[in-house]
Amino acid sequence: MEETIFQKIIRKEIPADIVYEDTDILAFKDVRPIAPVHILIIPKKRITSIAEMKDEDAAVVGKMFLVARNIARDLNISEKGYKLLIRVGKGGGQEVNHLHVHLLGGARLTENIHPVGEE
């Protein structure tokens, strides 16, 4: 399986603006934000996508959502609302083959926040 940019970020080989880190999860600002707040939340364990996750990955995936909630609170976007987005597979617009949750907020978000071209 080919290494991803996220694995290099986890190992600190590529710099990132990290907003949260623990033994299981890393969260950092997206370098191509599509909203005023755009944070990527990733498991340190390589999980390719939701479609590929194993039953034993449920705890870390659940923890990703708790981290998203806490970051939203810390960044003061909880009250007005925010969006959590997971893209699954090429057809779903997933660009990096490492599970990641987009935390988007700081502005009113519409359904088509980042259209993907047709296949």
Image: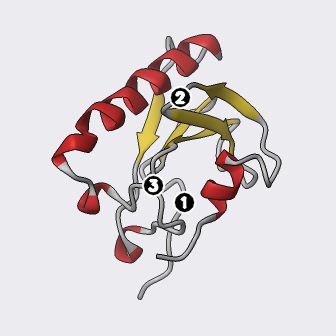
Q: Circle 1 sits on which residue?
A: 114
- Vertical arrangement, residue 29 with respect to residue 48, above or below: above
Residue 70, given in percent of the width and then of the height, sits at 51, 15
- Vertical arrangement, residue 118 with respect to residue 27, above or below: below
The residue positioned farthest toward the right in the image shown: 15
For mark 1, give the secondary structure: loop
Q: Circle 2 sits on which residue?
A: 23
- Based on the displayed image, in which of its 4 quarters is residue 22 positioned? top right
Q: Circle 3 sits on which residue?
A: 46
Image depth: mark 3 or mark 1 in front = 3
Q: In the rendered image, is residue 33 in sight? A: no
The residue positioned farthest toward the left in the image shown: 55
Quarter of the rendering occupied by the C terminus = bottom left
Which mark is on residue 50?
none
- Relative to the observer, which residue lies in front, 109 or 39? 39
For mark 2, give the secondary structure: loop
Q: In the rendered image, is residue 64 in sight? A: yes
Residue 67, given in percent of the width and then of the height, sits at 48, 23
- Vertical arrangement, residue 115 with respect to residue 28, above or below: below
Please name the residue shown 43% across and 84% down the image. Answer: 118
Amino acid beneath label 1: His
Image colouring? secondary structure
N-term mark: 3 or 1 = 3
The residue positioned farthest toward the bottom in the image shown: 119
Please name the residue shown 82% across and 48% down the image. Answer: 15
